[in-house]
């Protein structure tokens, strides 16, 4: 799938039959603008993406074309917000590729959640018996069956997985995974060993994916029968 830029060099506005002029009416009282959902601290909204899924055949059947739809939307945006800037591109896919038009557009534009969904489907199609550590959904599958890990057990496994190949000392696990705990709730190094032992028991015959480095701590090394599904955004415990 790829993109094709829409040629729109004309600066003049175009009247479109698909958008007939409306009779002037008395302006209604302005409704309070809906607030944008909470965004991470230190960021601000700078625009938005509107995915439109439609091919030329469907547009023609509706008496219009992709170019005319784009021009009409750009014109409407300019009317509503004269200072706005717009950019349009057409998503291209091989003929007969199938799938919903809007999904093709999202993949062509590298939408993170669409790409994550595609990877997940591809992995499921190739799935064999083994371990699937799904960081995006906070779950572990053992031979296609969910493992009954507690929240803290998954946090422990995730911490090791995201630092693959590095030996993690018990003190680091305590300071990182229990940083917000009250002093009375902070575990000892011996308690960490208990947590790891319980985690391994729930991993069954795949317990070897969590290795003990004697006298130091624990580590995760990638195995051929282990698949890791990353989240589309960075893990909150990895910077």
Image (cartoon, rainbow, N blue to C red):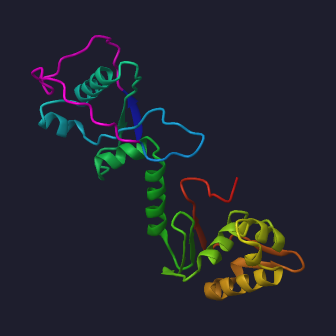
Q: Nearer the viewer, residue 148 or 3?
A: 148
* Residue drawn at (44%, 33%) of the image: 47
Q: Residue furthest front?
A: 29
Q: Nearer the viewer, residue 150 or 123?
A: 150
Q: Nearer the viewer, residue 105 or 156?
A: 156
Q: Nearer the viewer, residue 26 or 46?
A: 26
Residue 122 lies left or right of residue 168; in this view the side is left
Which is the main secondary structure of the residues drawn in magenta?
loop
Instruction: Give the magenta-colored segment's residue range.
Output: 6-35
Looking at the picture, how far across and down is residue 206, in whole percent?
A: 64, 83
- The answer to which quarter of the image holds residue 83 is top left
The quarter of the picture where the N terminus appears is top left
Residue 24 among magenta residues: yes
- The answer to which quarter of the image holds residue 151 is bottom right
Q: Visible in this render: residue 196?
A: yes
Residue 182 lies left or right of residue 39; in this view the side is right
Residue 225 among magenta residues: no
Q: Residue furthest left?
A: 23
Q: Is residue 196 above or below residue 139?
A: below
- The answer to which quarter of the image holds residue 203 is bottom right
Looking at the picture, how far across and down is residue 39, in whole percent?
A: 51, 45
Looking at the picture, how far across and down is residue 164, in whole percent?
A: 73, 65
Q: Visible in this render: residue 223?
A: no
In this rendering, the count of numbered labels is 0
Q: Is residue 65 above or below residue 191?
A: above
* Residue drawn at (29%, 46%) of the image: 101
Looking at the picture, how far across and down is residue 156, in whole percent?
A: 68, 73
Q: Is residue 147 above or below residue 49?
A: below
Residue 227 lies left or right of residue 33; in this view the side is right
């Amino acid at each position: 799938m790829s993109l094709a830029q829409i040629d729109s060099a004309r600066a003049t506005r175009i009247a479109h039959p698909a958008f007939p002029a409306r009779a002037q009416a008395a302006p209604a009282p302005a409704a309070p603008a809906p607030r944008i959902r909470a965004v991470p601290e230190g960021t601000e909204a700078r625009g938005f993406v509107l995915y439109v899924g439609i091919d030329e055949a469907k547009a023609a059947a509706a008496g219009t074309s992709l170019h005319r739809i784009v021009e009409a939307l750009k014109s409407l945006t300019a009317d509503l917000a004269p200072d706005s800037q717009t950019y349009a591109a057409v998503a291209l896919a091989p003929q007969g590729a199938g799938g919903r038009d809007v999904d093709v557009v999202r993949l062509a534009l590298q939408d993170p959640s669409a790409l994550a969904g595609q990877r997940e489907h591809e992995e499921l199609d190739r799935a064999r018996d083994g371990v699937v550590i799904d960081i995006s959904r906070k779950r572990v599958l053992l031979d296609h069956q969910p493992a009954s890990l507690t929240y803290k057990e998954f946090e422990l496994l995730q911490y090791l997985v995201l630092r693959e190949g590095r030996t993690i000392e018990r003190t680091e696990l305590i300071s990182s995974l229990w940083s917000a705990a009250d002093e009375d709730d902070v575990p000892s190094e011996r308690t960490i060993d208990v947590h790891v032992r319980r985690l391994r028991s729930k991993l069954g015959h795949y317990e070897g994916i969590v290795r003990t480095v004697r006298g130091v701590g624990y580590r995760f090394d990638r195995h051929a029968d282990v698949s890791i599904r990353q989240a589309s955004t960075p893990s909150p415990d990895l910077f």
